[in-house]
Image (cartoon, rainbow, N blue to C red):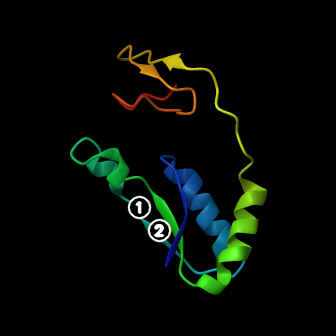
Amino acid sequence: MIKIFEDFNFIRVGQLQSLLESHGIRTFLKNEFGSSVVGELPFVEVIPQLFVLEEKDLDRARELLASETPEELPGADWVCSRCGSEVDGQFSQCWNCGQAC
């Protein structure tokens, strides 16, 4: 099992899992229900992660993900409207309270 993608956006992880599965690549989704324990565990322990089950599918999976995940340049740093924390532009959610930018 090889981790190929992770993102706080569970919907995006699920979309990419569906893409790989539709091309015959078997996958495993870790932390599918991790959002229910956010705050009780460190966020890095509950981020949804997508794995490819077989190493022979890894190169094809990476090609498919690259075609579906354009590289995004980080935006400007921002201040959370909920708690006032400063957040690096590469993040779309506040590190302190989880509010989306």
Q: CA distance from mark 2 to mark 1?
A: 6 Å
Q: How many marks?
A: 2
**Secondary structure beneath label 2:** strand
**At label 2, which amino acid type do we have?**
Leu
Residue furthest out toward the left: 40
Q: Nearer the viewer, residue 1 or 39?
A: 1
**Residue sitting at 47 percent across and 68 percent down?**
29
| Mark 2 touches mark 1? (CB < 8 Å) | yes
**Residue sitting at 66 percent across and 71 percent down?**
20
Give above or below for 54 relative to 90: below
Relative image position of residue 93 (x, y in whole percent): 47, 32
Mark 2: few/some/many CA within 10 Å (<14, 14-19, 20+): some
Relative image position of residue 17 (x, y in whole percent): 59, 66
- Decide if residue 17 is in sight here: yes
- The residue labelled by disc 2 is 29
- The residue labelled by disc 1 is 32
Relative image position of residue 63 (x, y in whole percent): 76, 67
**Residue sitting at 44 percent across and 15 percent down?**
81
* Residue 43: image tag: none
